[in-house]
Amino acid sequence: MKDHRQERLGRLQREYHRNHPWRLGPGGLFVPHSYAEIKPDALSWWDDVGFILNRRRVIVWWRHPRDLYRTAIEELGHEQAGEFPFGDWLTQGAIPNYRKVGRSRKKIVSYTCRPPSEASCAYFQRLRALEQELSAQGIDCDVRPSSKRKRLSWATGLGLVAPLEVRNVQELAAVADLARRLLVGHTTLDQEFPGYCFTKESWLSEAAARA
C-alpha cells in the first residue's frame, strides 16, 4: 500500500535539491565544520555531514556514544541540583541604554540586566560541582550504537550514534559512508560494531584524554 505522505516528501526533497544545489566538497560531501584546530588524537563528540543519494539530500547528525554518556551526566546533575531558583533579576530592574538620534533626541537601543541573584549563582556553583563529581566517579549508563531515520521536506535526516572518531575530513567521510550503507540496507550497526557498548568503565578510561 502506497504511503502518499512519504511519496510527497520524496518529491519535495528532489525539488528542493534541484532548485537549491548543495555546494559539495571533495568526495561529494557537505562538510559544515572546520578541523584546522583539532588535534590528531583528540576525542570526538559529535558532527554533521551531508551527501546526495538518489537525487535527494541526506543530512547525518552523528554523535559518539561518549557524547550521550556526557549528556546523561549533565541530566543527572540537573536532577540532583534541584529546581532552578527563578527570580526577577532578568526581567525587572534592567537599565536602559540609549543612543543619540539627532541633536536632542535619544532612543533605547538595549538593556543591561541586573547581576544574577545570589541564589542563581549558588545554584550554578552547586550544579558545576555535581557535574564534576559525577564525571570523575562515572554513572551507571550504557550507550549502544543506534540510528533513527527522519524524512524532512528538504532532506532525509539520519540520527546516528556510532563509536567513530572524527578529527578530519577523511574520518568524516567514514561516517558518511556508514550512513549511506545503512540507508540502502547494505549493513547494520550490529554487523559494524558487534557487542559494542559504551559504559562507565569506558568513560573512566578516557579521563586523561578528556583532561
Image: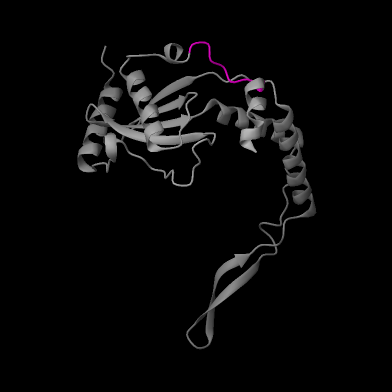
Q: Is residue 152 left or right of residue 54?
A: right
**Measured from the top left, where is residue 71 in percent x and y?**
61, 32
Query: Foreground residue, 169 or 93?
Result: 169
**Measured from the top left, where is residue 121 in percent x and y?**
75, 51
* 136 up-or-down from 129: above or below: above
The magenta segment is 194-200
Residue 62 in which image quadrant: top left
Queried whether the magenta region covers residue 110, the answer comes back as no
User: Is residue 151 shown to the viewer in this render?
Assistant: no
Residue 2 in which image quadrant: top left
Q: Residue at x 23, y 26 (%)?
A: 54
Queried whether the magenta region covers residue 198, the answer comes back as yes
- How many numbered circles does the render carry? 0
Q: How is the image coloured?
A: one colour
Q: Is residue 110 left or right of residue 207?
A: left
Q: Residue at x 52, y 35 (%)?
A: 41
Quadrant position of the C terminus in the picture: top right
Quadrant position of the N terminus in the picture: top left
**Measured from the top left, where is residue 181 in percent x and y?**
33, 19
Q: Residue at x 28, y 38 (%)?
A: 26
Q: Residue at x 47, y 26 (%)?
A: 164
* 38 up-or-down from 145: above or below: below
**Measured from the top left, where is residue 106 in percent x and y?**
54, 80
- Our reading of the magenta stretch's main secondary structure is loop
Work out which residue is located at the far bottom of the displayed protein and give it.
103
User: Is residue 19 shown to the viewer in this render?
Assistant: yes
